[in-house]
Image (tube, rainbow, N blue to C red):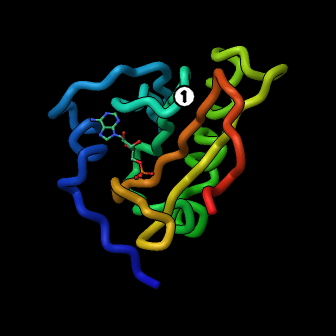
């Protein structure tokens, strides 16, 4: 399936520097910043700098260095948050059924409380 990337989405604007963000980590291929409406005491969004719509687009079409950089960034954020012992939840939503709001691939890293069941009934 071809992925159609909307370059006017809010994370594209963040990456262009058009709107501010609370950056927690920046690497060559990855940016991580605090979610503007946190759902947990710690709520970080990790995004690739490349134009990928969602997780499957990223996994299929990103380069190996981009994927490696992204995964290492997620690991670094977990380390910086100090969540190795208590744990955390990593979520990515995709498309209509995943209820994705922003069409630029992002991983939510949520921590600082017990998250409860994965999905509401
Ligand atoms: P999703 O539903 O998985 O697409 O999640 C999108 C997330 O982006 C939500 O948790 C929003 O709170 C978050 N968000 C939207 N706009 C911004 C922004 N300008 N800065 C930080 N987070 C944002």
24 versus 13 height, above or below: above
52 versus 16 height, above or below: below
In the image, taking residue 66 as reference, residue 88 lies left or right, namely: right
**Residue at the spot 63% in from the left edge and 34% down from the top edge:** 74
Q: Could you say which is closer to the camera, residue 118 or residue 43?
A: 118
Q: Position of residue 53 (x, y in %)?
A: 40, 62
Q: Is residue 97 visible?
A: yes
Q: Position of residue 18 (x, y in %)?
A: 15, 34
**Residue at the spot 24% in from the left edge and 45% down from the top edge:** 10
In the picture, the quarter occupied by the C terminus is bottom right
**Residue at the spot 30% in from the left edge and 65% down from the top edge:** 5
Residue lying farthest to the bottom in this orientation:
1
Q: Position of residue 1 (x, y in %)?
A: 46, 85
**Residue at the spot 18% in from the left edge and 31% down from the top edge:** 19
Q: Position of residue 49 (x, y in %)?
A: 40, 43
Residue lying farthest to the front in this orientation:
121
- Ligand 1, image quadrant it occupies: top left
């Amino acid at each position: 399936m071809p992925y159609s990337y909307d370059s006017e989405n809010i994370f594209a604007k963040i990456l262009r520097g058009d709107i501010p963000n609370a950056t927690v980590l920046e690497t060559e291929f990855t940016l991580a910043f605090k979610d503007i409406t946190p759902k947990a005491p710690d709520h970080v969004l990790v995004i690739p700098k490349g134009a990928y719509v969602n997780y499957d687009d990223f996994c299929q079409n990103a380069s190996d260095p981009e994927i490696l950089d992204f995964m290492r960034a997620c690991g670094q954020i977990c380390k910086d948050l100090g969540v190795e012992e208590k744990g955390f939840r990593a979520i990515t939503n995709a498309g209509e059924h995943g209820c994705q709001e922003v069409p630029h691939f992002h991983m939510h890293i949520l921590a600082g409380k017990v998250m409860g069941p994965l999905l509401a009934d």
